[in-house]
Image: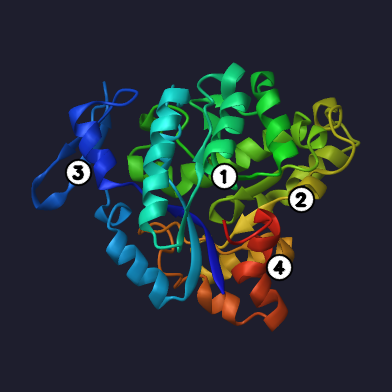
């Protein structure tokens, strides 16, 4: 059994609606050959939508061919946070309606991931409860920033408290927090900016004490956790420093080394090389790694070619944990 906790989807109906009526400033445009672009008001460039995002026939063919029992899908990251902006509840409700339609079309192989209304922090918890009650979400896609606003901002405290109490999985996916001209080319922001944003978000959540205050949060990190597995010793060095580099910032809000907080998190297998996947599994442990494909993106592992060889080489018990056991334990139950 394989359960994929990192995938993306849209519906063509949703894109058609956005071509007629923008949502939060987002507008879709249909091109020839069934292709679409997506842009926000004021954007210089239009992003071409990967047609595999809404091609359910090809998705189901891929899932059945790879014996994937369940794939959890959320919208592409630029719809859950963008430079200077993040969804409010009306945007979130439109996405949830669309995602429920994708789930309904998925013939029990596809499950929707909810979105967080971080654009209205005072209502984010209430909107989370509403979404869980209405749709039964077991996982949310959580951007690494709320349009550039850090997640450790006290304004989001009630949201994290409720997420912890509900036991819902927070799937942290990197987004671009600021203008894309931080990088020479937008694609470079995806290549190196995305892993960095995950690393920065979690590091802030550790040192500001957010993860200390919420020890039972279930957080799954995209792309093998960015650079965190490699940097765990460096983060601990700051906490343990006693010489002239010792800084009270690194100890005032937490009672244990950062690596102990990293050991509470989960990491997907979308690290994009066999060596990187082996390193994450060896460093964080097979109990903390979960299959994720980033379907359907090319700068991902949509067919599992970069992760499956590594998982298949694991001892049987560890292999089963990574493929499905950890996901079932994290989600609480498999069948909705």
Disc 4 to disc 3, C-alpha distance = 40 Å
Dot 1 or dot 4, earlier in sequence:
1
Disc 4 to disc 2, C-alpha distance = 13 Å
- Determine whether the residue tagged by mark 1 lies in a helix, strand or loop: loop
Query: x%, y% of residue 290?
Result: 61, 62
Q: Please name whichever residue, 193 or 133, is drawn nearer the observer in this view of the structure.
A: 133
- The residue pinned by badge 3 equals 36
Quadrant of the image for the N terminus?
Answer: bottom right
Q: Please name whichever residue, 82 or 181, is drawn nearer the observer in this view of the structure.
A: 82
Give me the residue at 76% from left, 37% from top.
Answer: 211
Dot 4 or dot 2, earlier in sequence:
2
Query: x%, y% of residue 272?
Result: 48, 63
Query: x%, y% of residue 25?
Result: 30, 23
Give me the residue at 75% from left, 37% from top.
Answer: 165
- The residue pinned by badge 1 equals 136
- The residue pinned by badge 4 equals 286
Dot 1 or dot 3, earlier in sequence:
3
Query: Comparing marks 4 and 3, which lies closer to the viewer?
Result: 3
- Crowding at label 2, few (<14), some or many (≥20) Cα neighbours within 10 Å? some
Disc 1 to disc 4, C-alpha distance = 28 Å
Dot 4 or dot 3, earlier in sequence:
3
- The residue pinned by badge 2 equals 264
- Crowding at label 1, few (<14), some or many (≥20) Cα neighbours within 10 Å? some
Answer with the quarter of the image where residue 153 lies.
top right
Q: Which mark is residue 224?
A: none
Rendering colour mode: rainbow
Query: x%, y% of residue 263?
Result: 77, 53
Q: Is residue 49 left or right of residue 274?
A: left
Quadrant of the image for the C terminus?
Answer: bottom right
Q: Is residue 23 above or below residue 237?
A: above
């Amino acid at each position: 059994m394989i359960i994929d906790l990192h995938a993306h989807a849209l519906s063509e109906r949703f894109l058609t609606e956005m071509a007629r009526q923008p949502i939060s400033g987002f507008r879709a445009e249909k091109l020839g050959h069934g292709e679409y672009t997506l842009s926000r008001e004021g954007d210089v460039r239009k992003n071409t939508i990967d047609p595999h995002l809404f091609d359910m026939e090809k998705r189901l063919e891929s899932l059945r061919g790879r014996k994937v029992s369940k794939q959890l899908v959320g919208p592409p990251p630029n719809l859950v946070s963008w430079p200077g902006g993040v969804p409010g509840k009306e945007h979130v409700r439109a996405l949830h309606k669309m995602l429920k339609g994708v789930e309904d079309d998925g013939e029990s192989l596809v499950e929707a991931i909810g979105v967080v209304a971080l654009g209205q922090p005072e209502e984010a918890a209430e909107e989370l409860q509403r979404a869980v009650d209405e749709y039964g979400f077991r996982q949310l896609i959580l951007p690494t920033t709320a349009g550039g606003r850090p997640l450790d901002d006290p304004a989001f405290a009630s949201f994290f408290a409720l997420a912890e109490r509900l036991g819902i999985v927070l799937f942290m996916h990197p987004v671009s927090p600021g203008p894309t001209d931080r990088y020479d080319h937008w694609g470079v922001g995806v290549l190196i900016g995305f892993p960095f944003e995950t690393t920065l978000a979690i590091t802030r959540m550790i040192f500001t004490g957010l993860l200390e205050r919420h020890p039972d949060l279930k957080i799954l990190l995209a792309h093998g956790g960015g650079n965190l597995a490699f940097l765990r010793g460096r983060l601990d060095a700051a906490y343990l420093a006693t010489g002239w580099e010792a800084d009270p910032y690194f100890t005032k809000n937490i009672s244990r080394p950062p690596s102990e907080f990293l050991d509470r998190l989960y990491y997907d297998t979308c690290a994009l090389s066999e060596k990187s996947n082996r390193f994450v599994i060896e460093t964080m442990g097979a109990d903390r790694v979960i299959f994720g494909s980033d379907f359907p993106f090319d700068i991902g592992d949509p067919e599992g070619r970069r992760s499956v060889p590594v998982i298949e080489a694991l001892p049987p018990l560890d292999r089963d944990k990574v493929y499905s056991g950890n996901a079932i334990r994290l989600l609480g139950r498999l069948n909705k």
